[in-house]
Amino acid sequence: MWNKPILSPHNNFIANLSIPYGLEGTPNGVQVWRVDRQHNNELEPVISKYLELDQQIWAPVDFAWETDYSLLLKITPVENFMNEGRQPSQKDFYYTRLRIK
């Protein structure tokens, strides 16, 4: 996992963002993991990667689970980090919904 994971409302998925944008060669996006409690009758759940978005168009800043099958992502265009020492202002952020399944 790239960063701190957060469970979905019904604990069926885990999502995490990449580390903050700016380190060359590091992933930039979001990961979603499936929590499977019925795998081979094991008592412990099995976690497997369900989705990974690694791209260079936008940088994720924060997210929240809306439902078990949708995330609300706070993002900003990557260009907002391109100038040395640039930190995006509040007007540079927008929100998008990521639906899974």
Image (spheres, grey):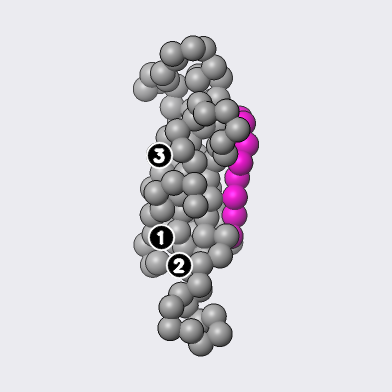
| Residue picked out by circle 3 | 62
The answer to the question of whether label 1 and label 3 lie on touching residues, with beta carbons closer than 8 A, is: no
Per the image, label 3 sits on a secondary structure element best described as: strand
Q: Residues within 10 Å of mark 3 (few under 14, many from 20)?
A: some
Left or right of 57 in this view: 13: left
Please name the amino acid that badge 1 sits on: Ser
* Residues shaded magenta: 50-57
| Residue picked out by circle 2 | 12
N-term mark: 2 or 3:
2
| Residue occupying image coordinates x 45% and y 67% | 12
Most extreme residue toward the bottom is 41
Estimate the spatial distance between the alpha carbons at disc 1 and disc 3, rounded to whole Å: 15 Å
The answer to the question of whether label 1 and label 2 lie on touching residues, with beta carbons closer than 8 A, is: yes
| Residue occupying image coordinates x 38% and y 67% | 10
List x then y, in percent, for residue 41: 51, 87
Overall secondary structure of the magenta section:
strand
Q: Is residue 53 magenta?
A: yes
List x then y, in percent, for residue 13: 47, 62
Q: Residues within 10 Å of mark 1 (few under 14, many from 20)?
A: many
Per the image, label 2 sits on a secondary structure element best described as: loop
